Image (cartoon, rainbow, N blue to C red):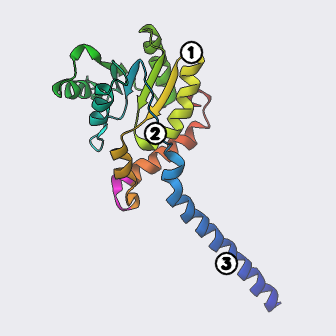
Amino acid sequence: MMKQRRKWALRVLLSLGLLAIGCVAFFFTLPTMLIAPASEAKSDVILHGAISKHSTADKYVIDLYRRGVARKIVCASSQISWELYPGDYARDSLISQGLPAEDVISLRLPIAPCGRMNLTKIVEFVKANGWKSVLYVTNPEDSRYLNNMARRSLEIDGVTITVSYSPEDRNELTQDWWRAHWKTQRIFGETMVVILDRFYSECR
């Protein structure tokens, strides 16, 4: 009887140990699972969605524009307070750094429960301007999910999309990310978004 109990206890401990190892491995591979390789392609427009105080995407977007990757930039954002859209400030920032005002547009998006729903508005805006190709600059942790989701939303309407992000943003986000609250928050926040969106048809 005692031997059976010991065997059972060892099996439980072994199972718990393997589970713990699996959880730790999953934790440290989250950035790899979330971040897709960045791509660049000559496009009709750059869609700038990486608007954050922790981001160097403004500098990256300016570099893309000056290299002739695209001749138009759209700063897309939802409202975060009364009449306050981060995209407006991103546009002003790009213009203040020498980009022509006529080539930088602010797109005000509605507050939506998930990113998929706002992609419909983006598709309408892209098509209304006659653009056929988009370089979507986003946050690194959004890249893999956004790449899959945006392709389904845009390419079905004959618009090709390439997803990219600032290399500096990726380096900053992934370096010892578990040690900084804002990095962990962003990694786990995106993980929860990916999981929860699976349960709602309008967000898939």
Q: Quadrant of residue 195?
A: top right
Please tell me how crowded label 3 is: few (under 14), some (14-19), or many (20+) other residues with Cα within 10 Å.
Answer: few
Percent position of residue 41, x then y: 45, 28
Percent position of residue 60, x then y: 31, 35
Percent position of residue 7, x then y: 77, 84
Residue bearing the label numbered 3: 13
The C terminus: image quadrant: top right
The N terminus: image quadrant: bottom right
Task: Say which label, 3 or 1, has the lower sequence index.
Answer: 3
What's drawn in magenta, residue-wise? 179-183
Frontmost of labels 3 and 1 is 1
Please tell me whether mark 2 sits on a helix, a strand or a loop: loop
Give the number of the disc on residue 38.
Answer: 2
Task: Say which label, 2 or 1, has the lower sequence index.
Answer: 2
Measure the C-alpha gap from mark 3 to mark 1.
55 Å
User: What kind of residue is marked 2?
Assistant: Ala
Magenta-colored stretch includes residue 27:
no
Q: Is residue 187 above or below residue 158?
A: below
Residue that extends furthest to the bottom in the rendered view of this protein:
2
Frontmost of labels 2 and 3 is 2
Q: Main secondary structure of the magenta part?
A: helix
Measure the C-alpha gap from mark 2 to mark 3.
42 Å
Give the number of the disc on residue 158.
Answer: 1
Percent position of residue 177, x then y: 39, 57
